[in-house]
């Protein structure tokens, strides 16, 4: 049990659908992250929140919309996705965002496997 | 721009063998380097974290080294077991907010 949960675990959606991914962390961390993992590509950072404020948007298309209502919850709202958006979406949390001298790691959830038809 | 390369992409070994996974990076201005394990269809589990001022870290049968000057890290697994079969990912933390990941090495240990 990593303390980071994600729902749903699997999602199939059409290109015109709207859906949301949910992440919850029970670790008392201040920073939360969304990553995308596509086949044969490295994990790509999508969004970072620190103390509920977005601190990085890594050139992600607007069809992905994050929301962080409090320090324990993070959502990723999806609309009008494309088939190439099919991937494993991973949520992570850490005590704080990386800093010099930092020794903390990120804790990952199990991911949501998304298929866009 | 930081680039992280992991070699080999895949590795198959018999049980009991000692093995080394490699990670190289292009920018030595890092805060720390981490090794993660990922089982199929699952999230990542942190194995070892080496701060930029450190040279190595050990946990059980795992030993990770860091040589910032040459831009290299290795993960040594002693006496490999079938349960070690997974994908191993190297990731760097540096100025900014992201972890930068390599593509990983997929390890298969046969009994």
Image: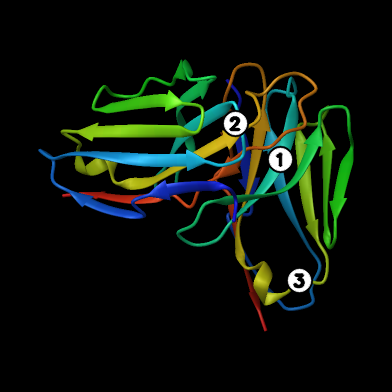
Question: Dot 2 lies on which element?
Answer: strand
Q: Are marks 2 and 3 on the same chain?
A: yes
Query: Which of the two labelled residues, at mark 2 and mark 3, occupies the earlier sequence position?
Result: 3
Q: Nearer the viewer, residue A3 or B88?
A: A3
Marks 3 and 1, how far apart in space?
20 Å
Image x and y of residue A107, in percent: 60, 42
The quadrant in which the N terminus of chain B is found is top right
Q: Chain of mark 3?
A: B
What residue does disc 1 label? B34
Asked whether the beta carbons under mark 1 and mark 2 sit within 8 Å of each other, the answer is: yes
Indicate whether B30 appears above or below A83: above
Residue at the (43%, 40%) spot, across then down: A23
* Image-based side of B1 in relation to A11, left or right: right
Indicate whether A7 appears above or below B40: above
Residue at the (27%, 38%) spot, across then down: A20
Question: Dot 3 lies on which element?
Answer: loop
As drawn, the label of residue B99 is: 2
Query: Which of the two labelled residues, at mark 1 and mark 2, occupies the earlier sequence position?
Result: 1
As drawn, the label of residue B80 is: 3
Image x and y of residue B39, in percent: 55, 61
Q: Chain of mark 1?
A: B
Image x and y of residue B96, in percent: 60, 17
Asked whether the beta carbons under mark 2 and mark 3 sit within 8 Å of each other, the answer is: no
Marks 2 and 3, how far apart in space?
28 Å
């Amino acid at each position: 049990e990593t303390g980071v949960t994600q729902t749903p675990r699997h999602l199939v959606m059409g290109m015109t659908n709207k859906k949301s991914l949910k992440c919850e962390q029970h670790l008392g961390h201040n920073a939360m992250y969304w990553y995308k993992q596509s086949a044969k590509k490295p994990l790509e950072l999508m969004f970072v929140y620190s103390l509920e404020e977005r601190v990085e948007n890594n050139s992600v298309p607007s069809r992905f919309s994050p929301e962080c209502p409090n320090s324990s919850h993070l959502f990723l709202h999806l609309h009008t996705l494309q088939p190439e958006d099919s991937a494993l979406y991973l949520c992570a949390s850490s005590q704080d965002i990386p800093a010099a001298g930092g020794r903390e790691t990120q804790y990952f959830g199990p991911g949501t496997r998304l298929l866009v038809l | 721009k930081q680039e992280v390369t992991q070699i080999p992409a895949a590795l198959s070994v018999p049980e009991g063998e000692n093995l080394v996974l490699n990670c190289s990076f292009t920018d030595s201005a890092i805060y720390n380097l981490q090794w993660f394990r990922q089982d199929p269809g699952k999230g990542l589990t942190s194995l070892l974290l080496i701060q930029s001022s450190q040279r190595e870290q050990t946990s059980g049968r795992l030993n990770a080294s860091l040589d910032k000057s040459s831009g290299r890290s290795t993960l040594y697994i002693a006496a490999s077991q079938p349960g070690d079969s997974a994908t191993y990912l190297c990731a760097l933390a540096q100025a900014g907010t992201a972890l930068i990941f390599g593509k990983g090495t997929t390890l298969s240990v046969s009994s």
